[in-house]
Amino acid sequence: MAAVRVGVLALLWGSTYLWIKLALTGLTPTQVTFARCLLGAAVLVVLCAAGRQRLPRDRGTWLRILVAAFFCNALPYALFSIGQQTVDSGVAGVLNATTPLWTLVVGIAIGAERRPHPVRVGGLLLGFAGVLLIFAPWHEAGLTGWGALAILGAAVSYALSFTYMGRKLVGKGHATISLSASQLIVATGLTAAALPFGGPVAMPVAPVVLVAVVALGVLCTAFTFHLTYRLIADEGATNAATVGYLLPVVSVLLGAVFLGEPLSLRIIAGMAVVLLGVGMSRWRRRTPVQPEPEVALATGRGLPGCAFNRPSSLTSASPTQAVRPPRAGS
């Protein structure tokens, strides 16, 4: 199921840049951010009610949700909308794909990732190299502007929030659907406070803008955010963040299928490198299976100091032969 969630999450999350671009044709960045948080919260609250899941009630949990809502929702959503006013979706995908690297750095800094295996570190670096190969940002314009810095800030904010959510919210007795709904409710309140500073909206709003906002709020915020929470709960913050490496692959494929964008050999090679890197970054060392206690006691295998663990002439005897006591007078 985890692999299915990763695939769905990558597909929905990878289309976010397209919907943001379309929504910005009729709304300001602040209004786009507020709309996606509001719609996402509404969908998740309905799902909570349908599943008979209650929202958290204690003050401490809500304070932690407030921190997570700022760094995982309100701040990065706003930074993406601001950044994509001047940055195209390709560069946005490259910068957002650095989230796994930042998550690993944060995890190591706070002790959440202790001695990551070289295979995982190599996979993260290889995935980032694949992303660069796909988009070749050295050929793109506008990579060093304020918009690009805003999107890079969003990636860092995601990394901080994933680690925080993994340590402070998941596994504390609350259902992930309840946590994700609560977090988007708080994010809606935070972004609503910024609406007066976002500028007026052009009326009437074009249908394509409405469709983009609905898709952004329902698919790319509600469902995507809940799937992200489930991945953090099941596999940890770093593994959840590796989905970011799949986003450029999804955007390239969507562009080729629906927009007729060409698929060059460089892009195909880059996607292969990305997939390999994601697989390596999700690698886990297998723990050898230990024998059951009663089996170990019966055989002596694995027990320190047991005769079966030391070479001896007795151990070479057949198991059916008994050791006879010495005869009297011998």
Image: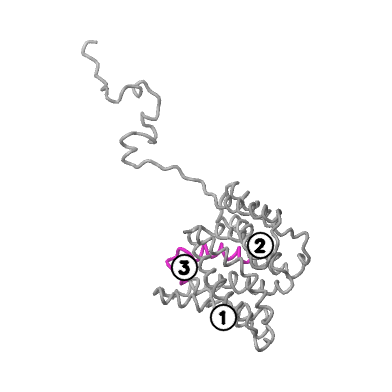
Which residue in the protein does label 1 denote?
189
Residue at image point 66% right, 65% down = 255
Mark 2–mark 1 distance (CA, rounded to whole Å): 34 Å
Relative to the observer, which residue lies in front, 222 or 188? 222
92 on left or right of 238: right
Instruction: Indicate which label's residue lies in the foreground, 3 or 2.
Output: 2
Q: Is residue 7 visible?
A: yes
Instruction: Indicate which label's residue lies in the foreground, 1 or 3.
Output: 3
Q: Amino acid at mark 1?
A: Gly
Task: Give coordinates of residue 145: x percent, y percent.
Answer: 77, 68
Span colored in magenta: 156-178
Report crowding for label 3: few under 14, some 14 to 19, many 20 or more residues within 10 A (C-alpha): many
Q: Is residue 125 magenta?
A: no
In terms of image quadrants, where is residue 87? Answer: bottom right
49 on left or right of 15: left
Which residue in the protein does label 2 denote?
252
Residue at image point 63% right, 54% down = 274
Looking at the image, which residue sits at the far top?
Answer: 330
Report crowding for label 2: few under 14, some 14 to 19, many 20 or more residues within 10 A (C-alpha): many
Q: Amino acid at mark 3?
A: Thr
62 w.r.t. 7: above or below: below
- Helix, strand or loop at label 3? It is helix
Mark 3–mark 2 distance (CA, rounded to whole Å): 31 Å
- Helix, strand or loop at label 2? It is helix
Instruction: Count up the numbered dots.
Output: 3
> Pointer 1 and pointer 3: residues touching (CB < 8 Å)?
no
311 on left or right of 67: left
